[in-house]
Image: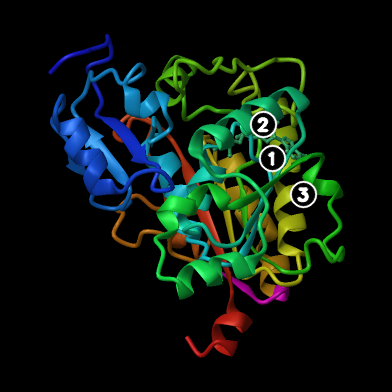
């Protein structure tokens, strides 16, 4: 192997950007240099030996693969939006999960990527540009591609992602622009306690500036600087709860994924538990993302076994995922 870096304790994950290259081609290319395995859970995720440094690899530089951890890659995969859907990424910068959603949608449909922080919108736009997913084209264009039996991969840059620089909490669910949103990815600002700052740079290509959290604000940044201050955690949890309640109120939403890179129950199980009565009243239930995964939510309420956790030590990063699915719609579809 070549290009080792200092951290030799954890495998390196790369997510193949299937908007640009298929998984098999990426494996073949990377195997010229590294030992590569496919991840056993996320279909477009590859596992490389610990210590491999891919920051300057041409596939990373040209957006064919993204340096994205396993837990982070599980979020869009848990939501699994279908091609043709309208999807809202509520807190989207720097956009790793936005472009993963676009890949799941195979070039068909629309993503609205909302981001409050103006500076971070630039990062989001850069990620979208790098991924090849951009532009605005009508749905019938993709039907035309199908009819002509053309491979969407060649046209994947036509996925429609609309970047919205604004506050997710202020989006009006009754606005016709959102009345057809069928899935929401909510990955709000959190304490970041599951992803130490020194690991963040492994998740970002070297040509993007590493975002280092600012201690001065609560909800407008990705990670708050003090990861354990109870007051700060309380503020973050209040924002997370409000955002989740807001997501639940979109009329056509069938799936909502809520995720954090926090290890704290306050930001994870407690937030989910606090919105459950409302979620149930809207017809949602908790679904079980990746049922084969052994580490589930802390047993603090009935149903927490549906939640997914990764462990900061054993899995090398601490993430939390909850998946809400609208029950009435499952029944309506006869599933
Ligand atoms: N999902 C992103 C990814 O995987 O690349 C990471 C999102 S980061 C955890 C949370 C983001 O939410 C930050 O960029 C933050 O600026 C943004 N944010 C915070 N409050 C927001 C709000 N009210 N509306 C929209 N975005 C918000």
Q: Which residue is mark 3?
A: 242
C-alpha span from label 3 to label 2: 14 Å
The residue at the point 84 percent across, 52 percent down is 171
Q: Which residue is mark 2?
A: 233
Q: Which residue is mark 1?
A: 237
Q: Residue furthest top?
A: 6
The residue at the point 69 percent across, 40 percent down is 237
User: Do the residues under discs 3 and 1 have CB atoms within 8 angstroms?
Assistant: no
Q: Residue furthest front?
A: 148
Q: Is residue 313 above or below residue 226?
A: below
Count neighbours of disc 2 (C-alpha within 10 A) and say few if under 14, some if 14 to 19, many if 20 or more. many
Q: Is residue 96 left or right of residue 191?
A: left
Q: Pick the residue in front: 317 or 128.
A: 128
The quadrant in which the N terminus is found is: top left
The residue at the point 62 percent across, 70 percent down is 140
C-alpha span from label 3 to label 1: 8 Å
């Amino acid at each position: 192997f070549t290009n080792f870096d200092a951290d030799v304790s954890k495998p390196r994950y790369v997510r193949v950007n299937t908007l640009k290259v298929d998984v098999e081609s990426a494996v073949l290319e990377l195997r010229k240099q590294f030992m590569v395995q496919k991840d056993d859970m996320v279909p477009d995720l590859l596992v490389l030996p610990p210590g491999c440094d891919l920051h300057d690899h041409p596939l990373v530089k040209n957006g064919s693969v993204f340096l994205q951890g396993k837990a982070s890659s599980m979020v869009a995969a848990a939501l699994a939006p279908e091609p043709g859907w309208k999807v809202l990424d509520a807190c989207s910068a720097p956009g790793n999960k936005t472009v993963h959603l676009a890949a799941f949608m195979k070039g068909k449909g629309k993503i609205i990527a909302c981001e409050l922080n103006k500076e971070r919108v630039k990062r989001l736009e850069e990620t979208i540009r790098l991924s090849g997913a951009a532009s605005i084209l009508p749905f019938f264009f993709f039907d035309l591609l199908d009819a002509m039996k053309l491979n969407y991969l060649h046209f994947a840059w036509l996925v429609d992602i609309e970047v919205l620089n604004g506050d997710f909490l202020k989006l009006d669910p009754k606005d016709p622009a959102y009345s057809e949103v069928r899935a929401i990815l909510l990955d709000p600002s959190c304490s970041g306690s599951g992803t130490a700052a020194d690991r963040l740079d492994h998740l970002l290509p070297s040509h993007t500036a590493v975002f280092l959290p600012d201690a001065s604000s609560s909800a407008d940044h990705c990670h708050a600087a003090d990861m354990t201050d109870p007051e700060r955690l309380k503020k973050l949890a209040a924002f997370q709860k409000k955002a989740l309640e807001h997501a639940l109120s979109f009329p056509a939403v069938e799936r909502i994924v809520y995720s954090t890179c926090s290890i704290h129950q306050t930001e994870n199980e407690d937030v989910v538990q606090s919105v459950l009565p409302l979620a149930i009243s809207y017809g949602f239930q908790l679904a079980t993302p990746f049922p084969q995964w052994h580490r589930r939510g802390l047993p603090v309420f009935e149903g927490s076994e549906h939640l997914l956790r990764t462990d900061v030590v054993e899995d090398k990063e601490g993430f939390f995922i909850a998946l809400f699915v609208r029950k009435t719609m499952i029944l309506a579809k006869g599933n």
